Image (cartoon, rainbow, N blue to C red):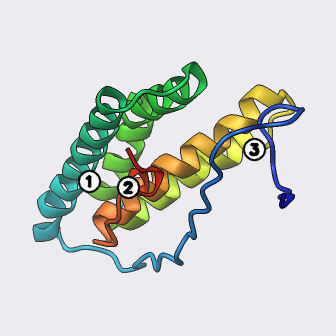
Amino acid sequence: MKEHSGNSIAKGLAAGIAVYINQRGMDIPLHSINLDEIQKEKEAYLQACAKSAAEIKEHLGAHSMNKNEMEILSSHLDILADPEIRKNILAKILEEYKNAALAIDEAYGEAIDFFSGMENQMFSQRAADFKDVRNRLLRKILKLESDPFALLGP
């Protein structure tokens, strides 16, 4: 038996299949966009949201999972649909002329920092969900697409 250490969601022992997902470095482009690129970047963000939500819903429907796993994925859907995050990202694209990847990274980074700084453990652990959703969207925008669910098998 091999022992792994890291951040846990709950104290105690866990049983199940451990999957290590190597997070490749994502190079976020820092360039501003031109006025004529705004619509393209906005559409790229909205399409990434739609594809991500469809992936999660498909996984929820196609696989049997425990209540905790279902709650995590459902929370990812809620985060994707969060109107404040969406408004923040669209403002960064439409008003600050930031590319979609940079807008996503900054908006989710702000939420992650907010939740990470909370003393309430439940809220501070929400930061991990925001990181997962951010990374999923960035993989779509940066065309680094790989389905993290594929690693879990049938």
**Cβ atoms under marks 2 and 1 closer than 8 Å:** no
Q: Position of residue 54 (x, y in %)?
A: 24, 38
Q: Amino acid at mark 3?
A: Ser
Observer-nearest of 109 and 154: 154
Question: Between marks 3 and 1, how big is the CA–CA gap?
Answer: 25 Å
Q: Which residue is mark 3?
A: 116
Left/right of residue 1 with respect to residue 140 in the rendered view: right
In the rendered image, which quarter contains the C terminus? top left
> Are there few (<14), some (14-19), or many (20+) residues within 10 Å of tag 1?
many
Observer-nearest of 32 and 40: 40
Element under disc 3? helix
Left/right of residue 38 with respect to residue 20 in the rendered view: left
Tell me which numbered mark, 2 or 3, is placed earlier along the sequence: 3
Q: Which mark is residue 22?
A: none
Give the residue drawn at x 83%, y 61%: 2
> Are there few (<14), some (14-19), or many (20+) residues within 10 Å of tag 2?
few
Which residue is at the far front?
1
Tell me which numbered mark, 2 or 1, is placed earlier along the sequence: 1
Of tags 2 and 1, which is closer to the observer?
2
Q: Amino acid at mark 1?
A: Tyr
Give the residue drawn at x 60%, y 49%: 110
Question: Between marks 2 and 1, how big is the CA–CA gap?
Answer: 23 Å
Question: Between marks 2 and 3, how big is the CA–CA gap?
Answer: 29 Å
Q: Which residue is mark 1?
A: 45
Q: Amino acid at mark 2?
A: Ala
Tell me which numbered mark, 3 or 1, is placed earlier along the sequence: 1
In the rendered image, which quarter contains the N terminus? bottom right
Q: Is residue 116 above or below residue 104?
A: above
Of tags 2 and 3, which is closer to the observer?
2
Q: Position of residue 123 (x, y in %)?
A: 73, 29
Q: Which mark is residue 150?
A: 2
Q: Which of the 4 image quadrants contains residue 111?
A: top right
